[in-house]
Every structure is written in C-alpha cells, then in structure tokens.
Image: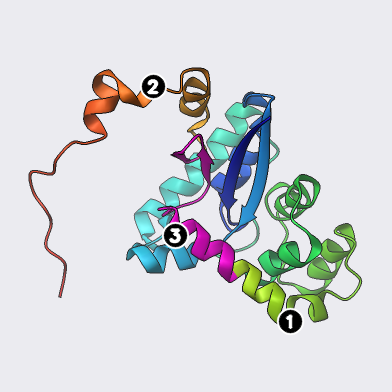
Amino acid sequence: MRPAVWYFDVISPFSYLHLKQFERLPADLDIEYVPVLFAGLLKANGQKGPAEIAAKRVQAYRSCVFMAQEAGIPFRFPPAHPFNPLHALRLLCGAGVNAAHVHAVFDCIWKEGLDVNRPENFAALAERLGVIEPSALIAQPEVKQKLIANTERALARGIYGVPTFDFGGELFWGSDSIALMNAFATDPGLFAAGELARVSNLPAAAVRKEAG
C-alpha cells in the first residue's frame, strides 16, 4: 500500500466532490483523512475563500452543482453557505476520523443539504457517528487541540486550500486534480522533465504590491 494524506474541511463542496470520486484513484492507496479548519489556512496565507468574493461565490456554487451533475454525484447545498464548520469538524475529530465517518459527515451536509448547526441535525449526525454526548465531546480540550494540530500540520506542509492530497512528496490541490495525481502515481518522475519541470521553478517577472 502507498500512503496518501487527504486534507479537507467539511465546509468545502469541492472536498465533497473530490471524496466522491476516490474510486478513480489507484486502488493501492492507504489514505489518511485529516480534517482541518479552512479558515485557519486562509488566515495564515492572507487569502480570501471563494465564498468571500461575491462574484466568485456565485461562479463557484454553479460550478459545484454542474460538476456534481456531470459526475452523477448526489448533491445539494445546505440552507446557507458559508457556515461555521467548527462543531462538525470537532465531532469528527472526537468520534474518530475514518472513511465511514468522513462520508457520513459530508453526506449529511452535501448530499442531504442539512444545516449541521441546527441542534436536531447535529444530534442526528452524532448518532450516525456513534457519539452519545456530542456537546461534551466537542468541548474536550484534546478534541479542540486535535483540529488545531491538524491545521498546523497542513500549514507546515505548505497547504493553502482544500481539498489537498499529499502523496509521494507532492501536493495535489482541488477536486479536479485526480487525473494529475493518477499520472504521477504511474510516473513518479512526471514533474522532473519537460515543461512540468520548467514551470516548477518559473521566476516571477512582477510582484503585486500589498494594499495598505
């Protein structure tokens, strides 16, 4: 088995669409699922998320719906987006991060289109994960610290967005990165030759000044 680390946040519809296409990946991958706080990545890198730019928000949402339809993936936006994913992420960290639990949380939000911050929906999600007292679980310091540590781990690896795979010493960002990752899995020297090698070290001819 070949190890691969998948960084994600349940706030991300692109993470959901990526997850639902994992059958396209090599069968010998041993995937470690690592939930992170996307907002923490954005803050650390001085970025805005797609949903924080009005025009981009609309385009991103339309793209998600269209991509899901094209791929035959059941998909429904929750009642409002962006939403606060913190409790859902902590619940996942506390319940144990495995493939079944990750699918359950994503399905609740992006297949069924539920607001997981509504008490009745959060309780139902906790039940799916086998958690009896979810409020107590997500309040535990070690559970909170796990999410913080995951996010710091992602930042230390150079990750700026979700979803991102860390595989073979390379990062593959975005729900549309599966074909590239598959090509690399077949040919680990893919980025060491030709135009792919050249652009990996391409210099910048101009740098935009920071506002302020």
Query: Element at badge 3?
Result: helix
Identity of the residue drawn at 74% across and 49% down:
107
**Tag 3 residue:** 155
Give the mark nearest the N terminus, 3 or 1.
Answer: 1
**Tag 1 residue:** 139
> Is residue 77 among what the camera can see?
no
Identity of the residue drawn at 73% across and 62% down:
92
Residues in magenta, as a range: 148-174
Q: What colour scheme governs how the chains and residues are painted in the rendered image of this protein?
A: rainbow
Identify the amino acid type marked 1.
Ala
Q: Is 152 included in the stretch rendered in magenta?
A: yes
Looking at the figure, which quarter contains the C terminus? bottom left
Query: Element at badge 1?
Result: loop
Instruction: Indicate whether 168 appears above or below 208.
Output: above
**Tag 2 residue:** 190
Q: Is residue 22 left or right of residue 128?
A: left
Q: Are marks 2 and 3 in contact (CB under 8 Å)?
A: no
Q: What is the C-alpha distance between the residues marked 3 and 1? A: 24 Å
